Image (cartoon, rainbow, N blue to C red):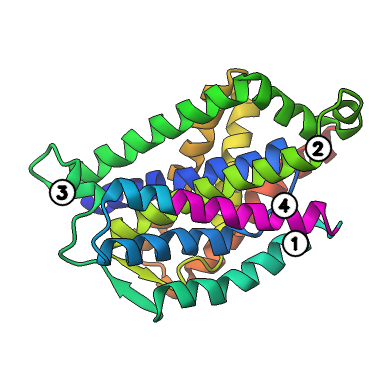
Amino acid sequence: MEFYISALVLGLCLSAMGLGIFITMKIFRIPDITTDGSYTLGAAVTAVALTQGWTLSATLGLTLLSGAVAGVMTGLVHTRLKIDALLAGILVMTGLYSVNLSVMGRSNIPLINLETIFNKLSIFSRSVYNELWVGLLFLFILSGLIAYLLRTDFGIAMRATGNSESMTRALGINNDRMKIIGLAIANALTAISGFLVAQYQNFSDINMGIGIVLVGLGSVLIGDALINWIGIRNIWLQLLTVMLGCILFQMVLAVALSVGVNPNFLKLITALFVLIIVGIPRLARRRKH
């Protein structure tokens, strides 16, 4: 049972990244690959700050800032240099590998015997329940904050920018600025996932972000399928559904491991799972036509 709870907690930790990818992919229609680098950056900054004796609140603030800066860099490359968003994300992600390695100073930093967010906010005697509680706390706080943001005039302008740039430009909205801010928010959320996962795993590793964008993309696609299937219109419920997609994604991997699948094939299973999620709706639409 604890094995599945651990998968649930990991899904909760990654749900912030799911929100970030939801903002870039569903709101701005931007395939942002910066995620792989900003996720590791969040974990790297967290590990270094905690080992240097920083408080958790200061570490969280620094992590948010570092992720936002990564997003701003992608936004500037895309909007100022007029480089395709996908290529801009790849360029920044590639550069972040060296940045992350410089921040950490080595490839791996253990966080054993350090105070983490999970034991700082502990209210249960068993650690697994404390981890679950903290994960749920972050899920509701982050989804509530982003839902509130998207309901404000600024958030509506962000959503309008993704729907029709020509219309928002006619209304006097600076589309480039909106994209930069949106990418900054998205990558700050992704860095929060790195912040949580590093403390949950008790280590930060330079390669922990490789392929993580596929996990986030699959989670958003699961959430999007549920949103369309159920017909959810409330923005907060949509965000919660996307975060639920992160949890379901991790539970699928947990089930695969529990039935004896070789861990070496997990990345393959991840890719096939995303392919199925993307492919089935398209095949269904073709049959209707």
Are dots 2 and 1 in contact, CB under 8 Å?
no
Give residue 230's position: percent from left, percent from top.
Answer: 59, 22
Residue drawn at 70 percent across, 66 percent down: 90
Alpha carbon of mark 4 to alpha carbon of mark 3: how far? 40 Å
Q: Which residues are magenta?
A: 63-81
Closer mark to the observer between disc 3 and disc 1: 1
Instruction: Residue at 40%, 31% (x, y): give it.
Output: 141
| SS label for mark 3 | helix
> Looking at the magenta stretch, what is its main secondary structure?
helix
Q: Picture quarter containing residue 149?
A: top right
Q: Residue 175: which disc?
A: 2
Identify the image quadrant of the C terminus.
Answer: top right
Instruction: Kindly indicate whether the residue at mark 1 contacts the one at mark 3 (C-beta within 8 angstroms).
Output: no
- Label 1 belongs to which residue? 88
Write down the residue under mark 3. 127
Tag in front: 2 or 3: 2
